Amino acid sequence: MASVSLQGISKVYPGDVYAVRDLDLEIRNGEFLVLVGPSGCGKSTTLRMVAGLENISSGTLKIGDRVVNDVHPRDRDIAMVFQNYALYPHMTVYDNMAFALKMRKVPKAKIAERVKWAAGMLGLESLLGRKPKALSGGQRQRVALGRAIVRQPAVFLFDEPLSNLDAKLRVETRAEIKRLHRELGTTTIYVTHDQEEAMTLGDRVVVMCDGWVRQADSPLNTYQHPADRFVAGFLGMPPMNFMDGQLEHDEGRLWFHGRDARLRLDGAPPEWLQGESQRQAVAGIRPESFELLDAGQNGDGRAIEATVQVVEPLGSTMDVYLQTTSGSRLVCRVPAAPLEEGKAVAARVLPEHIHIFEPNEQGDPKSPTYYGRNLSALQTASV
């Protein structure tokens, strides 16, 4: 096992196209770190630079105490699991898992011992004589995992390994990867665009966009206290609701005044009350933070009047799509209950569940502050 240190890492392609920008990241020994973000955000490029499959334009990359910028991939003591499995079709499962060890001239007895050990961990003992074409997608992915495990590397690298599996197999294999990490304790860097994978697997989640790291934190803190509007909107399904408006002071209390509601912000930091009145801001509310009440129950400044447009039952919960009086759309995730489309309701939200972001009408999309900081997160808690 080993730590991984990325210091000022950038990747620039011809034409001054930045894929990764000045990335500083310390990955602890034994940590499971997940890089997550939309397509083109730089997460896979970052992983490939760690693997040695992409040259580093600037910065320093260390695995353990060794600088590996110019070290060949095979000498970095890493093992990588790819999206497409990358198995040799003409070899058996045993030979696929043993191949890297044979290339390193490991003794046959040691190879057999390691393959048997890895096959036992992954439930592959009965499949060792088969070739990849005789395996299911889930079995092929387990063979790819086994091939990485037998090498006993210092660092595991995963590049969207579950994207080719169906939903049920993704959940099963995800649990398998988490179990393996708990048992092996190997430092792991995992790339995905799937936020559910990121939240369930990672000790720490690194959210990327436009080549920048937007936030690096535990899954729970990243979800509850997103650093900016991009992180808030990217994590969570359905995504966070956003409303434009302004902050107003009224007799020592702070309010968010938007087109559809005037919402109380109880517990706002004292310094907010010292700022300019009618300061432009964006309110963010997660769908699960709402409670649906009968229309007209907005006397305490905690609800938004709206009309039910669509109801999507999800079993114990349901997603309810609302249209506000101004024509804006909101989505709420609430406990399942009979609810007619077209009904007038009040969507109630507690003040502590409202996030306040800086407006981002102006700015450079290449800037790490372009998406508007979460003022709530900067104060260590939602208002």
Image: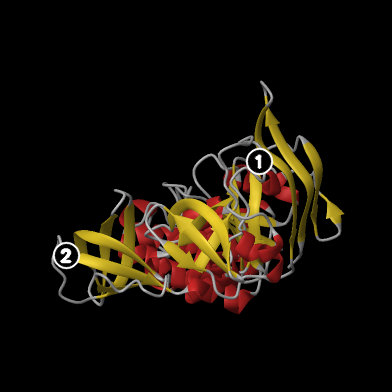
Frontmost residue, 94 versus 342: 342
Q: Looking at the picture, does residue 232 appear above or below residue 180?
A: above
- As drawn, is 184 to the left or to the right of 159? right
Q: Quadrant of residue 222?
A: bottom right
Q: Quadrant of residue 310?
A: bottom left
> Please, which residue is most extreme toward the top here?
15
Q: Residues within 10 Å of mark 1 (few under 14, many from 20)?
A: few
Q: Residues within 10 Å of mark 2 (few under 14, many from 20)?
A: few
Frontmost residue, 74 versus 158: 158
In percent of width and height, residue 136 lies at: 32, 58
In percent of width and height, residue 131 lies at: 38, 55
- As drawn, is 47 to the left or to the right of 63? left
Q: Nearer the viewer, mark 2 or mark 1?
A: 2
Residue 152, disc: none
Q: Check disc 2 and report its element: helix, strand or loop.
A: loop
Taking the image as drawn, is residue 107 in sight?
no
- As drawn, is 184 to the left or to the right of 261? right
In percent of width and height, residue 210 lies at: 60, 40
Q: Amino acid at mark 1?
A: Leu
Mark 1 — residue?
53
Mark 2 — residue?
343
Quadrant into which the C terminus falls: bottom right
| Residue at x 47%, y 47% (from the top left corner) | 88
Residues at circles 2 and 1 in contact by the CB criterion of under 8 Å: no
- As drawn, is 196 to the left or to the right of 116? left
In percent of width and height, residue 142 lies at: 45, 63
Q: Amino acid at mark 2?
A: Lys
Q: Check disc 1 and report its element: helix, strand or loop.
A: loop
Alpha carbon separation for disc pair 2 and 1:
57 Å
| Residue at x 59%, y 79% (from the top left corner) | 183
